[in-house]
Amino acid sequence: MKLKSLFAVSVFLMAPLALPALASPAADCAKQTLEQRVDGALAAADRPADQRERDAVRKAEVTFLLSHVKPGDRVLDIGAGQGYASWLLSSAVCNGHVVSQNPQGWVDYYKMGPARDAMAAARKNISLLTVDFDKIPASAKPYDVIFMGMVYHDTYNEKGHDTAKLTASLKSLLKPGGLIVITDHDTAAGKGFSETNTTHRIEKAQVLADFKAAGFTVAEDSAVLANTSDDHTKNVFDPAIRGKTDRMALVFRKP
């Protein structure tokens, strides 16, 4: 082969290959179906092992929640505890953001600090907020979704609780058309909020009335977490009913 030909071949072999552009992780995430986002969020390798133990009993709730969240959303997880839902929301919003909130009293009493800090360090789209329920500051960009998973009844047990003040503050945090997703343990008709600190239940009619009074509309009232065999008398932590309580699954929309 002539020298000129050899030189041409060597230049060709040394030239960088023109590779097709790769889709960004956020773009791939945005294309996923709800089932893929749920399964992917649950399967994420960095989730703590002690949280995975709850997946079987909470998958229906997780699916309900993530069905109302989309990629790019800003989500506020209220009463997030050590972050069970915050981890999952972090995956589901893709390039969106999750604010994981707890009152200082909860963080101190339940010693949540290390778990919360580890979560925020592992997931850059999660930030921590430690403040009372009715003192959550407004965000520069309003939230698309607020989630209260099995904790709305707990707000009644906080010192100085004011339902109207709380629901009004939540409304102010949302964008127009924004959603509040609530799951909680239901109780017998007529009980209202009388058992929030005993059996840790609240009547669904009470929750509906609270948010109606604040000017929200009901976007969804689902029976996906209902259990008609629950007689509503047992404490939700009773081994006989834990994980199997009759639960409400509500979505409220800000007009």
Image: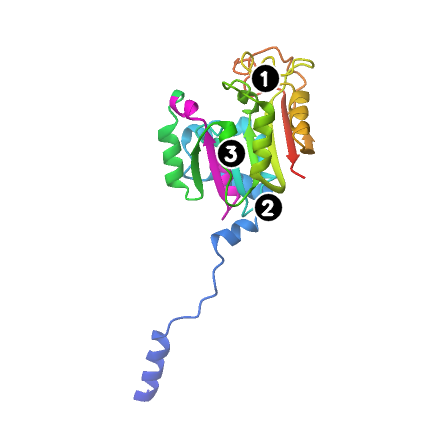
Residue 68, position as x, y percentages in the image: 61, 39
Q: Which residue occupies 59% across, 46% down?
A: 33
Magenta stretch bounds: 85-108
**Quarter of the image holding residue 7?**
bottom left
Residue found 60% across the figure and 31% down from its top: 168
Residue in front for this viewpoint, 32 or 72: 72
Q: Is residue 213 above or below residue 70?
A: above
Instruction: Please state the horizontal and vertical placement of residue 134, each as a whole percent of the image.
Output: 52, 28
Residue 248: x percent and y percent? 64, 25
Q: Mark 1 or mark 3, which is nearer the start of the sequence?
A: 3
Label 2 sits on what residue type?
Answer: Thr
Q: Is residue 179 above or below residue 240?
A: below
**How many circles with numbers are drawn on the protein?**
3
Image-quadrant location for residue 130: top left
| Residue 113 seen anywhere in this rendered image of the structure | yes
- Residue to which mark 1 is pinned: 201
> Dot 2 corresponds to which residue?
33
* Alpha carbons under labels 1 and 2: distance apart: 33 Å
Amino acid tagged 1: Arg
Query: Could you tell me the amino acid type at mark 3?
Result: Asp
> Label 3: which residue?
77
Q: Residues within 10 Å of mark 3 (few under 14, many from 20)?
A: many
Instruction: Name the secondary structure under disc 3.
Output: strand
Q: Is residue 242 left or right of residue 128?
A: right
User: In the drawing, does residue 46 fall left or right of residue 235?
Assistant: left
Element at label 2: loop
